[in-house]
Image (cartoon, rainbow, N blue to C red):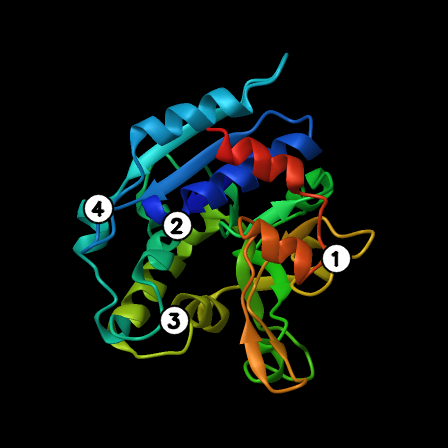
Amino acid sequence: MNILFCGDAGVRQGIFMSALSICKNTTADLNFYILTANAGRQDAISTDFAEKLSLAIRGEGRSNRVILLDISESFNGYLPIANIKTRFTPLCMLRLFADITPQIPDKILYLDTDVLCRRDFLKFYNTDMTDIDIIGVPDRYGKWFFGNIFKHDYLNSGVLLMNMANIRKNGLFEKCRRMCRDKKMFMPDQSALNKLALKKKVPAVYNEQGKIKEATVFKHFTTFFKFLPYFRSVTVKPWHIDRLHNELGIFEFDDIYKRSIEQ
């Protein structure tokens, strides 16, 4: 199975934890592709990190690989100018360059670096994608404010199964890059994908943005809202281990966290 991560040096622990959680929950051979870039004050992920991750994901009888791809030149030649001063992090848009990165295979599962796996996802990965660009789960909050409120078809882009063959053929990512460059938007690349892609939604277990359920396959540690005793947003990432324990009561990823800090 092919997995895609994107980001700069600041997301290394997230990638490490996510990759380890995937290896723990599937016996399939895995190819981890990492798109990275230097952009302004953000440094690209180093080959040293890729080598450490390669060693960590090797298992008996398995052919897991890490492929680090620095696309600084492509990215900096097509910056999302209209959104560069928003709360949006420009390097989130790296995935929109997967179509012009020849090493990326025709089918790949994109994951945000704050997504951890807790069950095998082979059935999801093997979903038929004929005439579909992306498959994902509706956004926990965005589904009420974007897209069709009756269909709940505004997808969260943290877990996306991508048909790169179709995307390359119809130019989806090129259209999204142009939209992010020219039009100011809230959550630019996610909004562009939802507006332009041929998409399909799947059950929340494949991108659980709320409380973990027994059947949850991927847990996505997104920002959420609390209303009492006052309204506020809360962000707890998998590597915030004390807050993970004390605020969310989650302990099941402790072994993954321990391995990630030992590297």
Of marks 2 and 3, the one in the foreground: 3
**Which element type, helix, strand or loop, lies under badge 3?**
helix
Q: CA distance from mark 1 to mark 2?
A: 35 Å
Q: Horizontal placement of 210 versus 47: left or right?
A: right
Amino acid carrying mark 2 in the image: Arg
> With respect to residue 246, does 6 lie above or below?
above
**Which element type, helix, strand or loop, lies under badge 4?**
helix
Q: CA distance from mark 1 to mark 3?
A: 27 Å
Reading the image, the residue beneath label 3 is 188
Amino acid carrying mark 3 in the image: Pro
Q: Earlier in the sequence, mark 3 or mark 4?
A: 4
Q: Earlier in the sequence, mark 1 or mark 3?
A: 3
The answer to whether residue 109 of the structure is visible from this angle is yes
Crowding near pointer 3: few (<14 within 10 Å), some, many (20+)? many
Looking at the figure, which quarter contains the N terminus? top right
**Which element type, helix, strand or loop, lies under badge 1?**
loop
Residue located farthest toward the right when viewing the structure as drawn: 214
Amino acid carrying mark 4 in the image: Ser
